[in-house]
Image (spheres, rainbow, N blue to C red):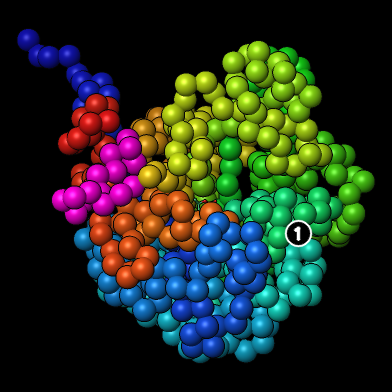
Amino acid sequence: MSAAPLSPAEAGYHFPPGFLWGTATAAYQIEGAASADGRGPSIWDTFSRRPGAVWNGDTGDIACDHYHRVDEDLELMTRLGVRSYRFSVAWPRIQPDGRGPANQRGLDFYRRLVEGLRARDIEPTLTLYHWDLPQALEDQGGWTARDTAERFADYVAVVSRALGADVARWITLNEPWCSAWLGYGSGRHAPGVADIGRAAAATHHLLLGHGRAVEVLRAAVPSAPVGITLNLGVHRPGTPDPLDVAAARRADGNLNRLFLEPIFHGRYPEDMLQHYRDDEPGFSVVRDGDLDQIAAPLDFLGVNYYFPDTIMDAGRSHEARVAGYGVPLGEQFPDLRVLSLETPGSDTTSMGWEVDASGLTELLVRIKSEYTDLPILITENGAAFDDYVDPNGRVLDHERETYLHEHLVAVHDALDAGVRVIGYFVWSLLDNFEWSLGYSRRFGIVWVDFPTGARLPKASYDWYADVIARNAVDKMGDLGEGPR
Ligand code: FCB
């Protein structure tokens, strides 16, 4: 008599052949060498010097010193076994003032990186913009100015001409929501402007820059896959009350639909246009033909996912406490009138982000049903925990293994539901500069000792190497050593 077949949870979760296992970083967060070889200042160099803007007054001046340790980092990737590495190019290394001829020494650094990856059989996945706008462009309005989209297209032309032959796939922007809404809306990120109307205008100019970049890339590297990376989320109403349902819809409009609709349906969502109609300049900056450009066909969508949101209407903080949510986490944008809540008893990371991998499956299924059937790359997923080097010289970050494990199972569930997920990049290869939180949060699968720059692979690095080697994650509860 043959035994009953094992369910995936018993047998482990196998990924499709050729699944693109990777890891991700971003230029300002790891490179350091902030004035080396002709690099100009970026908005993050300026912002991180503003008193109180970044935890501990940290800056990216040195960061992981990846600029000088690139060979060592390539070795770490080789031992990890990744098939692809997602990194970003620092625009101010290529055009120190954001315009004009290329700075050859800046290009040389990325040429060396890209050739180093190819020599190791690792596919370069290149992000053209991960938030480090040349300061000279910010001085002329930054992303609130339409001209910045044109400057971006010129920069993309320079990079694609120089590196086109070796780059496996291109990502135009990383998380334009953060650039627009944290950069110009709440002011928590560079350039530190708090003005809703300017955030809305920045949204449009970023998307326009994306559309222009796609056009430039199609001409320069016709056969290379091109996509964009969005930070998307799921917004669950805290109660079934219509006020909370409407609040969750507003949060969804701002984070998700404001980006997904123009890119995939060629229009801005009507409720959001209404919501921002009195904000100047807001979406009045949209011109005829822009949306056609923004909706240019892509080859894949990059999705960054970290946590789900539970949302209630801002006027209902008393009801939120009664419903057991505790003290609301607060309102990011007063105009949206939404409260972000923490589910009682939930696990959180050291960012305070709730751990709930089911949100990732839910998100992926929704993207497919409402927006696109394009292949999806999870271009970032990962977690910060309070890691430490133990007396045996090891970082036993089993919480991170569990987090990654659960999210990979969630990806597998989405595959089972018919979503075409073609790869997954852990954020991040290295502990690094976590924006306004400086070096206080560690997301790496490799520990970085910032005073010396020494690297030490964490337990999760070995765990991930094993996942990649087997193209599978184990069944739940079989995660290796140590207490959980
Ligand atoms: C994302 C960013 C990335 C990193 C992670 C934690 O929003 O793209 O640079 O900071 O969050």
Instruction: Answer above or below: position of 126 versus 266.
Output: below
Q: How many marks?
A: 1
Left or right placement of residue 207 versus residue 341 in this view: right
- Magenta part, dominant SS: loop
Compare residues 470 and 193 and report the one nearer the observer.
193
Considering the numbered disc 1 on the image, is that residue within a helix, a strand or a loop?
Answer: loop
Range of magenta residues: 387-402
Judged from this view, the residue extending furthest toward the top is 1
Which amino acid lies under the numbered mark 1 shown in the image of this protein?
A: Val
Is 239 or 9 nearer to us in this picture?
239
Whole-percent x, y for residue 482 in the image: 20, 35
Q: Write down the residue under mark 1.
A: 193
Residue at horizontal 21%, vertical 20%? 6
Q: Residues within 10 Å of mark 1 (few under 14, many from 20)?
A: some
**Residue 151 pos. (x, y %):** 70, 75
Residue occupying the point 29% across, 75% down? 71
For residue 381, above or below residue 163? above
**Quarter of the picture holding the N terminus:** top left
Q: Looking at the image, which residue is at 33% across and 61% down? A: 448
Instruction: Name the foreground residue: 418 vs 186.
Output: 186
> Can you tell which quarter of the image residue 242 is in?
top right
